[in-house]
Image: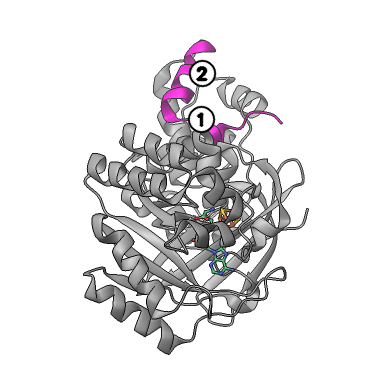
Amino acid sequence: MSESLLGLSRLALAQRLESWGYKTVHAKPIWQHIHRDGRSDVAAIPGLPAGLAHRVQEELPVVWPTIALETRSSDGFTRKFLLTLADGRQVETVLMRYDGRVTACVSTQAGCAMGCIFCATGQMGFARHLSTAEIVGQVLAVSIGDHERTKHHAPSTEHQHPAQSTQHPARNVVLMGMGEPLHNYAAVMAATEILADTAGFGLSPRRITLSTVGVVPGIRRLAAERRPISLAVSLHAATQAGRLALLPPAAKAWPLDELMDACCEYSAALDRHIFFEWTLIAGENDRPDDAHALGRLLSTQRAHVNLIPLNPTDGYAGAPTAPKAARVFQDVLTTYGIPSTVRQRRGIDIASGCGQLAARS
Ligand code: SAH
Ligand code: SF4
């Protein structure tokens, strides 16, 4: 696969220009054109020295994932995009809109090696890691909006990505699509840095949320490197045996007590709370006793719990918890002083809910 400009940081781009004998000042207009304005036609950038645009196009092509299919949910708030990557492999990216806030849910791998039993991505197995350019490309492809573009350009549509005509820029990115982001650490971190660059897409790092199944070395590394992004940890069970039943490979590799230690270390290093995710499965992990166990487990953590009623997948027969039982679960957590939210179910009719993403090729 050829290298794409989308995978380079602004500094790396400047260094590349220098190595080609051009001044580093040309990096900024190229960068803004791509990451701020969402355009791929490098030849249209004014003021570049002769030959530079051509060289960029030859050696660092701006490769966007192409939109093979866009499905809109009947709720009117959710769109799912099936994106085709340069090698033909496909991943899914979801755009959600709540109260004027647009959030892109982005994939970090094609498939996933973690094998959580209730997750469609886990059920399909691992195909490959996504590159930094592919992670950044998903956000740009689905989210750069009309007004962003028309602010800076005449409304020519020749080189604009088809998604741009009707989209609005995401101001939140959740790394909660297909894959385990901490299993693809370097590529994912480089993508978060590119998306947060204020001369480009300019996301606030706190509005980038990484969700992990509990990859302990990755959590420790986030803490050691003081990564400014937000962290969500998928728990689903408050005992090692419970986690082994639902997330067998991950729970075996990183036992619950080690995971909790790593979370404490992270919160202390970054002075942050952690979102703990809990997929509510009827009769499996949604009884008041489960909520008490979770309350006790999180007593030493700075925690916010996100409860996600199970979304259906082909490979798992469980049912979602009913709203009333979810409220009882929340009430128990409240007695431990733990704030919680029941995640709104969105996009279920188009299989774009948590854990439902599974492109087939
Ligand atoms: N691999 C990461 C991020 C992707 S999954 C992780 O596991 O955290 C994003 C979230 O969706 C996780 O909390 C995951 O447990 C949850 N999830 C997976 N399958 C689900 C399903 N069928 N219904 C509801 N939530 C699910
Ligand atoms: Fe992978 Fe997350 Fe799905 Fe588990 S829940 S299989 S870690 S994507």
Q: Secondary structure at mark 1?
A: loop
Point out the tag, 2 or 1, that comes first from the N-terminus. Answer: 1
Residue 342 appears in the picture as rendered: no
Is 131 colored magenta in this rendering?
no
Labels 2, 1: front one: 1
The image shows residue 105 at horizontal and vertical percentages of: 51, 58
Q: Residue furthest bottom?
A: 324
The image shows residue 199 at horizontal and vertical percentages of: 36, 38
**Stretch in magenta:** 1-21
Q: Secondary structure at mark 2?
A: helix
Q: How is the image coloured?
A: one colour
CB at disc 2 and ligand 1 closer than 8 Å:
no
- In the foreground, 128 or 139: 128
The residue that appears at 38% across and 79% down in the rendered structure is 288
The reply to whether discs 2 and 1 touch (Cβ–Cβ < 8 Å) is yes
The residue that appears at 30% across and 67% down in the rendered structure is 295
Query: Which residue bears the numbered disc 2?
Result: 16
Q: Amino acid at mark 2?
A: Arg
Does 24 appear above or below 44?
above
Q: Main secondary structure of the magenta part?
A: helix
Query: Which residue bears the numbered disc 1?
Result: 8
